[in-house]
Image (cartoon, coloured by chain):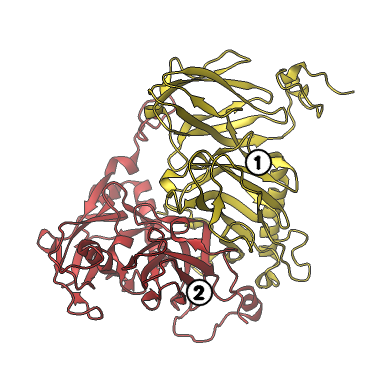
Amino acid sequence: MLPAWVNRPDGSVFLNDLKRYVKGAYLSPAAASIPVVIAAAPSATVPTGAPPIIVESPPDAIHEIFSMFGEHLTAPAAPALPVPPLVDVQRRMTVQIFDLAWRRNLMNRDIPVDHVFGTNLSPFFLRESIFLEGQQVLQFNFLNNSTAGGTAFKFQMESRKFQATSLTRKNVTEYINDQRRRRLYLTPFWQTSNQAISIPAGGVVDVFFTTDRSFDFIILGNVSSFISTGTAGDLEEGFAVELFDAKTERPLQNQAVVRSCCSGSAGFPFLYPTGWIQEPNTILRVRFTNLITNAATEVFWTFFGVSNYTNTTPFQVTPTVAPAEALFRGVP
Amino acid sequence: MSLRTVDKFVTWNSQKNCYDTVFWRRDILPSSLTFVEGTTLPVTVSAAPALTPPLTIKQPYASLNGLDQGLGTPFEVRSLVFQDSTDRTQNANFRVRLKEIGEVREFMNREVHVRTIFGTGQQPALLREPYMFLSQHNINVQLIKISGGVTTARLFLWGAQYFPWSPSLLMAKREKSDMTNLLRKWMNRRKYVTPFWLTTDEAVSLGANAAADFTAKIGDDGPFEAFGHCVVATGAFSAEITETKTKQTLMNGVITDINGMGNSQFPTIYPTPYLIPAGYRLRMRFTNLTAATNTIDWTFFGRKIYAPMTNVSEILRETAVPTPADSPSVMVPRPL
């Protein structure tokens, strides 16, 4: 295949402003702040925190972030556990990302780092890029929720860098203006359950996911992981899932779907065949069935997608839409 | 920039100066479908060489006072996903045959290896032509273990379920017509284009270092457009494919399973789709590169096109007359 910059039918190169002045780049935190080392949590319910980590776009350029990846560096020293300590620490380490310039959280609460960062071979690709103007920052708050040991985690983001020189080109500035408009309303978003999920041995629980009051959330995929000390049942799958649409309670399946058939990892997430639109302040129900028969299973389940901030005040308790539109939106 | 088409779900509203969510898409839900309720999952796949009794996947009918305008609740199948809980998914060793009962439509010329047609949640096997599965229709599934003992498996169709009768569309006529127009296009298209898998007419099993020719026949009912192939084999082998009618080969030498074969999760995709006219046969020469028996399952994936043909030789194939199995279809006289 021809490289994209050979852009004329006869194979010659025509000046392509966007590609010529725009460079692939990486954004990473300051060297002093990685790896993210956090001591073990004192108890299962009290995590250990770390100072916020800032990633800043340089003053001379605009960055558009496309993907995120990271790695756990070392196996922590830990007491013996049925679950390998390294796995326990890695699966319980969480992050919350805050877009400081726009005062927006990109997730409803702390999300496992392995659901947000892929690997160098299979990064997690954002479904809506994050556009950072010069000196705008993202803030990362990491927590260690494991009592088994300390964390050691490095991360980076792949981006596109618009250097100051590119701003003299018309099609570059048009693109940037369009992205500025998009960023006002559309941001990547991760959503996990309102509460931590624990399914009793061989049992079933209903878990709820509430969409924020200020935006429509378009779910595009999900990532999941689990921890169990069980030794009997389906140890590879761990659990099965039934999804029910928010407000209408329409089931998305005719029988429960096992984990590997309806969820993925950050590098290879499960992508829904079509987007799943959640209206503001609605509650989605997910029923988890434990396939491990002799121990409880802790499940970490994250939907990801794009939030579309609506132009209505988030403080309005009752919808202000006209009756016809209200019916169209399914308001009772 | 959007890496996945979130732009299908939002549209710029220049009056309100913001993005509006496209709310008629709220009534198209990502969904999965597996065997009818009452079939306990996972299903048991009997030890080789037994065939499981036919299992049924059914798309139910649901409507609200006829507001579906006869469209029901159709399900657009987009990918296939499976899990094997005994042999494990990566080692699953059974074949699958899918058949639409209502229209007596075969999706494949013979049963194909599950790992050449079904993927996993992380790497689903994407259909190159989505299949519009109508309400009240059934797909018949048969599972055949290739070797070894009993295993247990789950199979899921993933796709989009349409709710044209949704009450939330009652007062939104334009949005409702957007959905029904889209569905009507699908209703028409599904008559002419369906997903299809082509494998060898006979199961391939070669002795130590043996080589043999096998055929894969495209039916006379329409051309087959292959987008790529997937292979599962018990050992290394090489292959060479020839169109028997034109004597054209698809390669100037043999290709080996190491560098020329993917599986359903990471298939081998052709640089350009390979359109094989109706009635053609492929001769596939396999050479076993090992000193043990080699079982090879080769599956082309793509779509069958039942659209009318304009070329003279294609007109000859507009016949419903059964053709002798080994005769090129163009030799069959056009019915009066």
Where does residue A132 sit, x and y in percent of width and height?
Answer: 28, 60
Residue assigned mark 2:
A285
Closer to the camera in the image, A229 or A86: A229
| Cα distance in 3D space between marks 1 and 2 | 34 Å
Q: Is residue A130 above or below residue B217?
A: below
Total residue callouts: 2
Residue occupying the point 22% across, 70% down: A142
| Rendered-image quadrant of the N terminus of chain B | bottom left
Residue occupying the point 48% across, 85% down: A316
Disc 2 residue type (three-letter): Arg
> Chain coloured yellow: which letter?
B
Q: Chain of mark 2?
A: A
Which residue reaches farthest top?
B247
Q: Is residue A103 left or right of residue B188?
A: left
Secondary structure beneath dot 2 equals strand
Figure colour of chain A: red
Closer to the camera in the image, B77 or A24: B77
Circle 2 residues within 10 Å: few <14, some 14–19, many ≥20: many
| Rendered-image quadrant of the C terminus of chain B | top right
Residue assigned mark 1:
B194
Where does residue A20 sit, x and y in percent of width and height?
Answer: 29, 40
Which residue reaches farthest left?
A32
Circle 1 residues within 10 Å: few <14, some 14–19, many ≥20: many
Determine if residue A190 is in view: no
Closer to the camera in the image, B314 or A47: A47
Secondary structure beneath dot 1 equals strand
Determine if residue A39 is in view: yes
Disc 1 residue type (three-letter): Thr
| Image quadrant in which you'd find residue A227 | bottom left
Where does residue B325 sit, x and y in percent of width and height?
Answer: 72, 22
